[in-house]
Structures are given as structure tokens and as C-alpha cells.
Image (spheres, coloured by chain):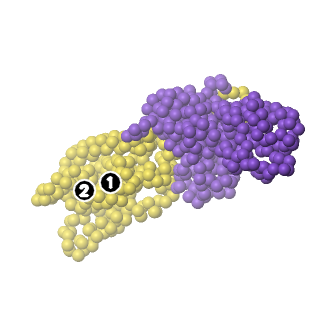
Chain colours: A yellow, B purple
């Protein structure tokens, strides 16, 4: 640098190199910090829908005798799966649409010293953390609403695996939605995508039981949520007929890898002209 | 950085950008270099390619051709390193609405790896300097355009960039906020920050920039100091004189004035109130119908505008002695200098706005 000193107190350049990993953590910390401050609002936002599904289908209909007593054992793992996946999806899709189309808040992070693709990865990691938290909160809520939930210690490793994959698959799909949908179609898109996703994901029924509704069984097989729901049942209620866990895990891993790759590509297209 | 003060901080060579699906290049072979501690202005109408040029230099736009580097770092090859060296104040407010003003500054510095104690100190300093200390804990959505602008400049300085890019820094601001931004830009220069700003406001470019690049249709048409740009504009500098005549006919004096060295042509203008000249840099002939005859019988007054090929001050003496030779009296002299607007018109054949 020059020998001439600036007259005003110029902040000196930091000696420590701002490594991308550090920038990544700072960007992640920003999201955690903001969500942490409004945790009750966040939880209300993501837990209300599964709570009502659980209450109406698991409690009300069962109490009224419209469903068989064992139905809650089928429903509960499906609702945990649904909460994880849908929360992940919404946690990437909504903020990205708003950021890229309206507030442009994300620009400051796109100019941080880390590869732009890492900003996309951060969005997925953060959305998955939100999804994980929301899904775990469903456990005490399940106990509260239903009285008891199906749980077995030997199923925990598979439960954790499927839970993490469910959070990730939702977040990665949300990344595609949030970056691919033009701002003027947001409302339509969410209506057209979210609702079918909610009800074709085998959350409220076991996939095998659809044998007699073949076309619907085929449709549900296309929804990644189905494999999360089925995996959850394999972990928590293995006596209920379900898709073999290795198939669910495989489908989810492949979906995550493909959708993350596509999502990052779309993210880069939006972030860099 | 390399110890060479003369080395350009920003260097752009044959830069080309064509957006997807676009039929023409948004930036079409632009080359320039910005020196250290300089305020460099890119002047041009909307769509000239200024913002795209800045976008490429700040790694937000991928170039189609040419090279662009900041402090020797090629922004296309190593964007991560380049981002440490630059800071951007965009046209529109992109402050983080979930964070307070202070947190906006702190998180920005954290993204750039500024240590915690250091970023707290800098944030306090900058908030103070930008008159934001008492609003540090407010959310940005309560801020006016000018205030948000201030916050964004303060935020940009948090990681001590080598070059600060200001994209249309005063567009849409009220006059007071505009003056504040101008003052801050001058401060930045004084503290040794290199500034690149884009503007479609010729006054702003003339006021702030050490050198101005004039852009239109993706091309850089001219590049120099504002003074040199306007000086290189023959027939745009004017000298306006008022003369009380005694005997000599106005026509004769006009003819003799026109024959002086350095005078391109002379235009007689209507006698008006003193100080009633058209504003400097105004279009020629805006002062009223030229050649309006003065009332006969009384001492006659001649007002004339001389369009010059060179510097106006050099012609004051020749004009004065010419007038004195006719026993007439020189009552008023005014120099009209051309503006960057005139330069733009001369280059493109149309007005800037």
C-alpha cells in the first residue's frame, strides 16, 4: 500500500482472509438469528396445519367413529413426514420468491465472499433446520392431541434418516419452486403445487392400501413425500404394510441430489445475469 | 495494493455483455481504467450500459467478452476474491428488513469476515458519521429513500472496500438528501476510497467526478475530466457582451467581433435586464429573438453572444480593445461555459433526458 495515510479514520483492511466457510456460517447465522427472534410466530406458522390435520383426522373422526381405532398409528408418521417436507419446501420457496422478485434483500449475501452456489446451499441447509424443528415439535403435539404416539426405540435410526432426508427433499424442491416460478404466478403456483403435494404424499393413508385405486397409486408414487411417509411408517409402525425402506431411502437420495443440482442451477440464473 | 499508486484499481478492456435473448449488446466493447483514489463517473441515459458495466465489475453480471478486473483480480475468474475488494450501493433499497440498521452493518461485515470487535467499532463509527446513531435500532422499512441510501453507503464501507460502486446514487432523492450524498462522496475521495458512480445527471457527474466517461448504447463515447470534455467542444463556449455604442453601427461592430481570432460566429441578442442572460450552458439563442433592433436616436446598446473555438477568458482583452477602438463602452461581459449536456448532445445528436 502507499505510504500516504488517509486523513480520516479509514477502517483498515482485515488481515484475516474472509474464507468462504466463514462467510457461509455468517450467512447461515443471519437466517438462524432472524428466525430465532420470531420463533413462536415461526412455529405457529408451520405447526398449525399439521396440528389441525392430526386433530380432525386423528382425534375428531376417530372419536366420532368414522375411522378405525388404529388409524392414528397410520396417520401420525405421515403427518411428521408431511410437516418435515412441506416446511422445508415453504422455507426455501417463499423467501426466495420474495427476495429475488421484491425485496432484493439477498443481494448483500450474493455479494459476500463465497461462491454464489454456496448461498443456495445455505438456503437449503437453513430450510432443513426449520423443517427439522417443525417435525420434531410434532412429537409432543402428537402426544398432546392423540394421547399417545407410535414409537419404538429400534426404529430411531431409520426415523432420523428418513426425517433428515424428508427435510432435505422438501428444501431442495422448494429451491426449484422459489427460483423457477415467475413472480406474477406465485399464487397460482403455490395453489397448484402445494395442495396436490399435501394430499398425494401418502401421509393420510398407506401407499400399499391404494392397490384398488391403481391410478392414484401411480400418482402418489411420483410424489417424493410418499417415500418420506412410507419410510416413517417403516420406522415407527413396521406392522403396517409399507414400501421397503431401502427403496424409500434410495428414491429420496436420488431426488435430493437431482433437485439440488437443478435448484442451484436455477438459483445461479436468478442471482447472476 | 502492489505498491504502485499509478496502477489502475479498476481496469476494463473491450468489455461486452449481451443478455440472454437480447438482440443487441448492453455493453459493447467498453474500455477504461480507474485510478486509485479517483471518483470516476459513468454518465449516460437509462439503458446506456452503465449499470451493466457496474454489474460485471461487482460480479453480479457475467460478461460475454473482454476483461474486467479490480486491483488486479479478474472479476470473472475469481469473483469470490473480487467481492472482498468491491462494495456496491445499488439503485434501489436492498437493506435487510428483518434486521435493524446496526445489525445490517454488523451482518454485512460478518459476511466479509471482519472480526467481531472490529465490526462493532466500525459500525458505531459509521453510524455516527452518517448521522444514523439515534436510529441505529430502527428497522429499515421506516426509512426514507435518502436515509436508506445513507445506510447502504455506511454498510458498503463496513468491509473497507478498495472500490465503492454507486449506482445512480441520487436518483429519486430530494435535493437535501442529494446534497448529503454528494458530500459523502467527496468525503470518500478524501479518505482515499476509489469511487465509481453512474448517473444520468450531468450536474452530478460534473460536480463529483474527477473523470467522466460518457456512455450511450453500450459504448463509451468519450472519457476525460469534465473540464477537458467541455473544453474540447468548439463553438460551445460563449462570451456575451453588452456595449453602449457611440456612432458605430451595431452591424459593423458585430462584423468586426466575428472577425476576431477564436470567434466562430456572433449572434446579436435582444437587450435585456442586466443579469438576464440565459443560464450557462443553455441552448444557444435562448436569450430572446436575436438581432432585435434598438430604439433609434438614443445611445444605442448592443448585446451580442460570441461563440468561441477556444477559452473565453483569452478573448476578453481583444474584445475590450476592439470596442474601445470604436469609442464605445463595454458595460457587461459574461462567460458561458458548455456543460456535459452539451458534450452529450455534440456526441450523440440528442439530449441526455
Residue pictured at 59% horizontal, 53% vertical = B172
Identity of the residue drawn at 59% across and 29% down:
B33
Where is A64 relative to B241, above or below? Answer: below
Helix, strand, or loop for circle 1?
Answer: helix
**Quick one: label 1, few (<14), some, or many (20+) residues within 10 Å?**
many
Considering only order in the chain, which callout, 1 or 2, is on the residue closer to the N terminus? 1
Q: Quadrant of the C terminus of chain A?
A: top left
Residue that carries the numbered disc 2 in the rendered image? A201
Q: Nearer the viewer, residue B337 or A191?
A: B337
Residue matched to label 1: A85
Q: Which residue occupies 60% across, 57% down?
A: B144
- Which element carries disc 2, helix, strand or loop? loop
Residue A215, how many percent across, how many down? Answer: 14, 56
What quarter of the picture does the N terminus of chain A occupy? top right
Q: Nearer the viewer, residue A131 or A118?
A: A118
Percent across and percent down for residue A184 are 38, 56
What is the number of callouts on the image? 2
- Tell me, yes or no, whether the two marked residues, 2 and 1, touch with CB atoms within 8 Å: yes
Compute the Cα span from label 2 to label 1. Answer: 10 Å
Please provide percent x and percent y for residue B342: 63, 40
Question: In the picture, residue A56 is in which quadrant?
Answer: bottom left
Mark on residue A124? Answer: none
From where the camera sits, is residue B232 visible?
Answer: yes
Amino acid at each position: 500500500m502507499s505510504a500516504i495515510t488517509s486523513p480520516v479514520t479509514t477502517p483498515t483492511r482485515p488481515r484475516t482472509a474472509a474464507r468462504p466457510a466463514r462467510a457461509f456460517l455468517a450467512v447461515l447465522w443471519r437466517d438462524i438469528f432472524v428466525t430465532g427472534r420470531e420463533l413462536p410466530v415461526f412455529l405457529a406458522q408451520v405447526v398449525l396445519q399439521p396440528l389441525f390435520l392430526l386433530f380432525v383426522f386423528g382425534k375428531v373422526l376417530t372419536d366420532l367413529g368414522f375411522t378405525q381405532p388404529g388409524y392414528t398409528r397410520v396417520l401420525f408418521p405421515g403427518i411428521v413426514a408431511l410437516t418435515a417436507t412441506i416446511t422445508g419446501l415453504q422455507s426455501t420457496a417463499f423467501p426466495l420468491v420474495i427476495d429475488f422478485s421484491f425485496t432484493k434483500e439477498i443481494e448483500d449475501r450474493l455479494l459476500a465472499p463465497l461462491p454464489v452456489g454456496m448461498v443456495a446451499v445455505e438456503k437449503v441447509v437453513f430450510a432443513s433446520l426449520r423443517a427439522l424443528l417443525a417435525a420434531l415439535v410434532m412429537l409432543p403435539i402428537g402426544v398432546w392431541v392423540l394421547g399417545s404416539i407410535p414409537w419404538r426405540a429400534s426404529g430411531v435410526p431409520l426415523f432420523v434418516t428418513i426425517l433428515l432426508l424428508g427435510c432435505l427433499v422438501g428444501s431442495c424442491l422448494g429451491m426449484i419452486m422459489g427460483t423457477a416460478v415467475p413472480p406474477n404466478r406465485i399464487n397460482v403456483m403455490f395453489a397448484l403445487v402445494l395442495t396436490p403435494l399435501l394430499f398425494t404424499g401418502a401421509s393420510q393413508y398407506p401407499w400399499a392400501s391404494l392397490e384398488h385405486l391403481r391410478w392414484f397409486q401411480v400418482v402418489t408414487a411420483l410424489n417424493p413425500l410418499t417415500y418420506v411417509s412410507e419410510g416413517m411408517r417403516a420406522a415407527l409402525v413396521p406392522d403396517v404394510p409399507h414400501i421397503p425402506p431401502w427403496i424409500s431411502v434410495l428414491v429420496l437420495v436420488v431426488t435430493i441430489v437431482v433437485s439440488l443440482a437443478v435448484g442451484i442451477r436455477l438459483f445461479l440464473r436468478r442471482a447472476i445475469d | 495494493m502492489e505498491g504502485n499508486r499509478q496502477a489502475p484499481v479498476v481496469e476494463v478492456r473491450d468489455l461486452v455483455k449481451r443478455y440472454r435473448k437480447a438482440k443487441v449488446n448492453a455493453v459493447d466493447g467498453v474500455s477504461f481504467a480507474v485510478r486509485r483514489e479517483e471518483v470516476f463517473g459513468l454518465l449516460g441515459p437509462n439503458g446506456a450500459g452503465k449499470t451493466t458495466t457496474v454489474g460485471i465489475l461487482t460480479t453480479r453480471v457475467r460478461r460475454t467478452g473482454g476483461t474486467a478486473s479490480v486491483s488486479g483480480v479478474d472479476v470473472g475468474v475469481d469473483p469470490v476474491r473480487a467481492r472482498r475488494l468491491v462494495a456496491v450501493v445499488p439503485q434501489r433499497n436492498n437493506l435487510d428488513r428483518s434486521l435493524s440498521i446496526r445489525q445490517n452493518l454488523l451482518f454485512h461485515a460478518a459476511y466479509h469476515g471482519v472480526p467481531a470487535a472490529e465490526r462493532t467499532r466500525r459500525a458505531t463509527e459509521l453510524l455516527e458519521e452518517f448521522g444514523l446513531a439515534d436510529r441505529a435500532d430502527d428497522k429499515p422499512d421506516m426509512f426514507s429513500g435518502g436515509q436508506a441510501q445513507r445506510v447502504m453507503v455506511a454498510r458498503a464501507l463496513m468491509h473497507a472496500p478498495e472500490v465503492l460502486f454507486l449506482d445512480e446514487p441520487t436518483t429519486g432523492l430530494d435535493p437535501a438528501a442529494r446534497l448529503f450524498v454528494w458530500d459523502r462522496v467527496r468525503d470518500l475521495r478524501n479518505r482515499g476510497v476509489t469511487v465509481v458512480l453512474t448517473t444520468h445527471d450531468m450536474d452530478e457527474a460534473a460536480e463529483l467526478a474527477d473523470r467522466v466517461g460518457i456512455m450511450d448504447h453500450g459504448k463509451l463515447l468519450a472519457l476525460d475530466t469534465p473540464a477537458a470534455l467541455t473544453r474540447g467542444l468548439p463553438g460551445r463556449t460563449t462570451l456575451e457582451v453588452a456595449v453602449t455604442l457611440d456612432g458605430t453601427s451595431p452591424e459593423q461592430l458585430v462584423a468586426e467581433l466575428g472577425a476576431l481570432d477564436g470567434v466562430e460566429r456572433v449572434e446579436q441578442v435582444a437587450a435585456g435586464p442586466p443579469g438576464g442572460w440565459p443560464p450557462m450552458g443553455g441552448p444557444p439563442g435562448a436569450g430572446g429573438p436575436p438581432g432585435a433592433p434598438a430604439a433609434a436616436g438614443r445611445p444605442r446598446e448592443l448585446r451580442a453572444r460570441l461563440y468561441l473555438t477556444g477559452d473565453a477568458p483569452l478573448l476578453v482583452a481583444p474584445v475590450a480593445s476592439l470596442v474601445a477602438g470604436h469609442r464605445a463602452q463595454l458595460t457587461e461581459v459574461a462567460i458561458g461555459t458548455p456543460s456535459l449536456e452539451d458534450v452529450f448532445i455534440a456526441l450523440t445528436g440528442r439530449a441526455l433526458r
